[in-house]
Image: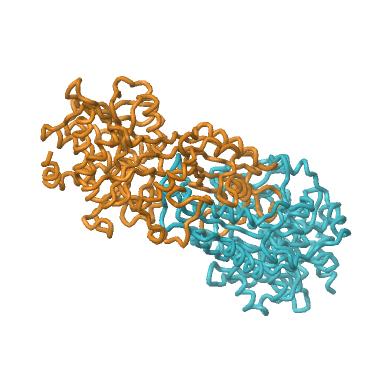
Chain colours: A cyan, B orange
Amino acid sequence: MQNVRTYVEEHKQRFLNELIELLRIPSVSADSAYSQDMLDTAEAVANALRTAGCDTVEICETQGYPIVYGEKRIGEDRPTVLVYGHYDVQPPDPLDLWDSPPFEPVIKTTSLHPDGAIFARGASDDKGQFYMHVKALEYMLRSNSLPCNIKFMIEGEEEVGSKSLSAFVKENHEKLANDIILISDTGMIANEVPSITTGLRGLSYVEVEVTGPNRDLHSGLYGGAVANPINILTKMIASLHDEKNHITIPGFYDKVEELSMEERTEMAKAPFDLEEYKSALSIEAVYGEEGYSTNERNAIRPTLDVNGIWGGYTGEGAKTVIASKAYAKISMRLVPNQDWQEITALFKQHFESIAPAGVQVKVTAHHGGQAYVTPIDHIGYQAASKAYETTFGKAPVPQRGGGSIPIVALFEEELNSKTILMGFGLDSNAIHSPNEHFGIWNYLKGIETIPYFYKYFAELST
Amino acid sequence: MQNVRTYVEEHKQRFLNELIELLRIPSVSADSAYSQDMLDTAEAVANALRTAGCDTVEICETQGYPIVYGEKRIGEDRPTVLVYGHYDVQPPDPLDLWDSPPFEPVIKTTSLHPDGAIFARGASDDKGQFYMHVKALEYMLRSNSLPCNIKFMIEGEEEVGSKSLSAFVKENHEKLANDIILISDTGMIANEVPSITTGLRGLSYVEVEVTGPNRDLHSGLYGGAVANPINILTKMIASLHDEKNHITIPGFYDKVEELSMEERTEMAKAPFDLEEYKSALSIEAVYGEEGYSTNERNAIRPTLDVNGIWGGYTGEGAKTVIASKAYAKISMRLVPNQDWQEITALFKQHFESIAPAGVQVKVTAHHGGQAYVTPIDHIGYQAASKAYETTFGKAPVPQRGGGSIPIVALFEEELNSKTILMGFGLDSNAIHSPNEHFGIWNYLKGIETIPYFYKYFAELST
């Protein structure tokens, strides 16, 4: 195993080239214009698993985009690790803010990445991160050091709610049976401060439509006399937070897990520099729920954010129109014990109830998922912690993450397994943003660390 | 003059064909993609004026789109009428709501237009309406009945603020000198209830931009911890109206002309059916400033409407992003005594002042104009009233309009002339909306009525 670093060093250029080829395919699941690219990406992932040494590789058809499944069995008596990842990526818009085209990967150095980083949509989320596992498998097989059975399940709908995966998991308990699930789809605090995500927020994503008059109207002839759907929508959305930035949906906080002062004090020890945070985002002040710190606001507290809004004339110049319709996409991040379906229903009921006479409101649920917590006394966490200690030279910090991987809660429910979130990205990787990137150091460090997880997990399992 | 009806009847098909050709040119001033079409339209208008019999026709270059000027002088002792109109049109979006393409005119009958209406962008606003004046001139010259000197000034930037026209008017006092200005760019109550617009609202049109973080962010990693520009924008816009739908900008109402109860009672006599109004718009209730009727809200009261809003992800599916920027286009309709530049400044000052720490706000003024009132004892109004009485068989109702033709106040200031707003359209013509149309009956009735205005104006002037 001491050879993994050497192996990574020797094959570094090939590892980069292979990932770059995968990043060239624009696998945007949210936009049906890319559906052929999605299928091409699934094919490419299947090939990569075969080449790395999986015995069985299948492209499993679903109602949506296919799930790529692969496995390498070494013995019934060995523990089984299920690796999950996703080959789909977020839409790249707004395109004009990218310094280089999102699907033409380039390597550039930055202050945080003196060894270079790969800039491309999906570099970090999640092609670069799941591909580390494919290359770690290659190493373990070539060095004859794989101590566990391994299963891969790489889906194509993570960015749009993992709808097909839910059905797939429910129908394939036996095929997917495992002792631990391993996912690299999160980040760590810094290259010098490795961390493992022990909590994920849940998610409820909805779209709202407010309809006023049955057609666009001239704002001179009708202005002031009929409900303007855009004005009404802004009023309705604004009312979803009170002056302390608490969310006003009745029942929203009823089941929220409140952390003890002790736990909050413990959390507050994680390294965090508010001035650096503000400066990185070019903001003069942070903003959020009264009574909570920035790290608490984006990890242990639920939120409600508008992710998109549109209506009326948005082109060049001016148009004096009252639009017939206005729209918004709204997502709520949820914390342990909040049920996403219940929250979606509460949102819908409340949003419809606050619509004034003169408009019609439609709320459509997009997707959602439950929050999740990994206990740090679990052997999976301990194996991961030892792996990081070996390759980073220091133990990782357990950290609650603000993001959501809705499928993780489902894995626990359906497969009765815990998930270890070994992410090697950084918050500054601009995932879901223009100029997404993934540090080359991080990519290679991931490939180097993962085999140690297998080693320690196998040892702790016996 | 008794022959005008016969003349119109005989040349009806040609009058329609000529207008249809003019409507085919997509003269959208707000979008620079149409700039060649704008120039083509100016050329077509100039040709139409020459054909109708103007002695002098010029396409006057400006900083923006050209102004088409034409004149027919018959004698220094005769009164001079200046006809104003505009050859530019509103952008046609949203295109998918048009039943036929906006620049491929079609004639269809509707319940309000049993003789048919021309459906096309600009049919009513304002190509169809200014073209009535061109055809009225043709009739008066062919029948040797023109009793006034006549000047035409047809501009190409009305829908984007008449910027070049302001300069043109200021620099051409002598060329444009006149005794009365005639404009057909408004509507009347109904074909059986002719009316003349005696008041116009002013306008202030602004665009706002709210910037939060310097890049789009992942709503899981940053949600709840930084100011989301869209949420902030909705909050800021929502706060511009209080719970009684009064506008909250300090000083906004300071100079508003308050009508006496007597005047309001007089206004309330105009025929208006609230149930029909709601049913035509498919709304269950009207909405607006407390304490005022629907007709007051859209004529004598100032308003603030969002005409467009955008930010974040607005495509298919879901994207969990916190946008870096959010935008809105906002217009305020103003009433007599409110100065549009002062209101624009008040808006800017207030809007910037309500931005919370964590966002930057930019307010850009698009354009504006003052409100205007025509006194009904003016000989221009009386000549128009008699003309309607002759052709409609009943006197027109004087009516305050909710729309704005910002240039009208400027005409009074610069040219020292009053304006008569002889509009022949209907509120239901869907101007600025999909399926804009103009009734054939209205078009022909306009051509028939206008020559009587000249006759009575010449008589009353002596």
Quadrant in the picture for the N terminus of chain B = top left
Q: Residue at x 43, y 36 (%)?
A: B371
How many marks on residues? 0
Which residue occupies the foreground of this view, A194 or A54?
A194
For residue A90, side relative to residue A374 (left or right): left
- Give how far across and how far down residue B307 sits, in percent: 48, 46
Q: Residue at x 20, y 45 (%)?
A: B391
Quadrant in the picture for the C terminus of chain B = top left
- Give how far across and how far down residue A247 sits, in percent: 69, 58
For residue B244, side relative to residue A138 (left or right): left
Q: Residue furthest right?
A: A262
Q: Residue at x 35, y 55 (%)?
A: B98
Which residue occupies the foreground of this view, A91 or B406?
B406
Q: Residue furthest front?
A: B262
Q: Is residue B459 visible?
A: yes
Which residue occupies the foreground of this view, A60 or A34?
A34
Q: Is residue B455 above or below residue B228?
A: above
Q: Is residue B12 above or below residue B161?
A: below
